[in-house]
Image (cartoon, grey):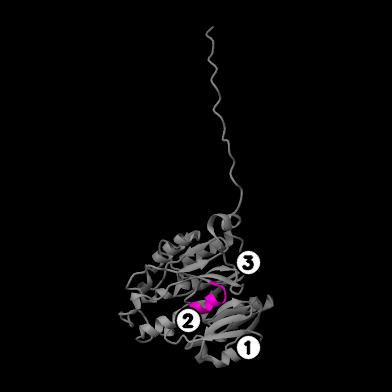
């Protein structure tokens, strides 16, 4: 009988996978990033300092209100960034951008930050399509994980989500977010543990949530009362959030009173020129830092629109 040759067994793997989440790995492998609140202390933002794209452009094609003064426009944006820095916020910039994209400073529309990383959006408006490419590059250069890029026929912009808390978010549909985009974002939020998604239909004539509803602290929000659905208001009230109704339609719609940014719970930076709204907020314990922003607002956006949060808390 022929003697069998003894062949050594193929060894198994000598390692085992690290069983951790991307949140566990974030600080060591990626950086200090993550957002699940609109009011926790602001630590890092992504902005686009207006460049050549605002110097010579067709303001009507770009859907601006009127022609702008580029020097004043840029100076007001710089003043906002300086306020952030004065409050300990790391300001990062999208350094590259196409020269035919004057709306590119409105970075909130290009990025939605989550606890796990960024969702890179796909703007609905033709004049803005393509800005997101350079937002994605900036995020990658910074080391911010990109967990999803909106793709296919989907449209979604970052200001169509408002964080209420780690388990609750408002997700809007409307002219800037179609069903495909909504479902992509809903999937990601639920996958990462958001158990309550409040659907908000943005009314015709409005673009995003942040012109109609915004949070000044964990328990105080300001709303444009006639434009926020009852179900959303009811859900927020049941969570103990006091809803302040913007007292002036002119301030809400024309001077962007609700488009503010919380630097920390109870401290906000908001566009100047909204005295009635500022007084109401201050009467309810909110510290208000006004900043001149009227030149930037000719682009139909304000402070919240210009600011993509990268880290809170």
- Label 2 or label 3, whichever comes before in sequence order: 2
Q: Do the residues labelled 2 and 3 touch (CB within 8 Å)?
A: no
- The residues bearing labels 1 and 2 have C-alpha atoms spaced at a distance of 22 Å
Predominant SS along the magenta part: helix
Residue 229 locus on image (x, y percent): 57, 80
The answer to whether residue 85 is above or below residue 139 is below
Q: Do the residues labelled 3 and 1 touch (CB within 8 Å)?
A: no
- Label 1 or label 2, whichever comes before in sequence order: 2
Left or right, residue 69 beside residue 292: left
Magenta-drawn segment: 79-89
Taking the view exactly as shown, the residue that stands out farthest to the top is 1
Q: Is residue 83 magenta?
A: yes
Residue 6 locus on image (x, y percent): 55, 17
The quadrant of the rendering that contains the C terminus is bottom right
Kindly state the secondary structure of the residue where label 2 is placed: helix
Residue 192 locus on image (x, y percent): 59, 60
Q: Which residue is drawn at 55% across and 64% down?
A: 114
In the image, 196 versus 304, the foreground residue is 304
- Label 3 or label 1, whichever comes before in sequence order: 3
The quadrant of the rendering that contains the N terminus is top right
The answer to whether residue 109 is above or below residue 299 is above
Q: Mark 2 points at which residue?
A: 79
Q: What number is the disc on residue 166?
A: 3
Residue 179 locus on image (x, y percent): 47, 67
Q: Mark 1 points at which residue?
A: 282
Q: Is residue 109 magenta?
A: no
Neighbour tally class for label 2: few under 14, some 14-19, many 20 plus, Cα within 10 Å? some
* Whether residue 299 is visible: no
* Whether residue 282 is visible: yes
Residue 283, located in which quarter of the rendered image? bottom right
């Amino acid at each position: 009988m022929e003697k069998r040759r003894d062949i050594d067994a193929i060894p198994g793997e000598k390692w085992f996978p690290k069983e951790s989440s991307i949140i566990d790995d974030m600080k060591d492998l990626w950086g200090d990033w993550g957002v699940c609140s609109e009011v926790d202390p602001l630590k890092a933002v992504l902005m686009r300092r207006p460049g050549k794209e605002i110097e010579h452009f067709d303001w009507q094609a770009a859907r601006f209100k009127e022609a702008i003064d580029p020097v004043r426009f840029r100076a007001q944006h710089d003043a906002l960034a300086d306020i952030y820095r004065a409050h300990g916020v790391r300001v990062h910039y999208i350094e590259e951008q196409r020269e035919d994209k004057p709306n590119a400073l409105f970075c909130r529309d290009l990025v939605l930050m989550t606890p796990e990383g960024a969702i890179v959006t796909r703007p609905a408006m033709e004049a803005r399509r393509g800005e997101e490419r350079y937002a994605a590059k900036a995020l990658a250069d910074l080391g911010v994980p990109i967990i999803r890029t909106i793709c296919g026929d989907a449209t979604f912009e970052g200001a169509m989500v408002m964080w209420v808390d780690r388990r609750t978010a408002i997700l809007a549909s409307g002219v800037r977010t179609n069903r495909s985009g909504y479902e992509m974002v809903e999937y990601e939020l639920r996958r990462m543990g958001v158990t309550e998604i409040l659907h908000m239909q943005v009314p015709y004539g409005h673009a995003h949530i942040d012109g109609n509803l915004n949070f000044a602290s964990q328990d105080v929000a300001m709303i444009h009362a006639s434009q926020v659905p009852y179900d959303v208001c009811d859900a927020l009230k049941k969570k103990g959030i006091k809803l302040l109704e913007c007292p002036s339609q002119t301030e809400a719609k024309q001077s962007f009173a609700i488009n503010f940014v919380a630097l920390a719970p109870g401290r906000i930076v908001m566009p100047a020129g909204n005295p009635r709204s500022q007084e109401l907020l201050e009467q309810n314990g909110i510290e208000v830092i006004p900043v001149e922003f009227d030149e930037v607002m000719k682009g139909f956006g304000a402070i919240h629109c210009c600011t993509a949060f990268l880290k809170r808390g």
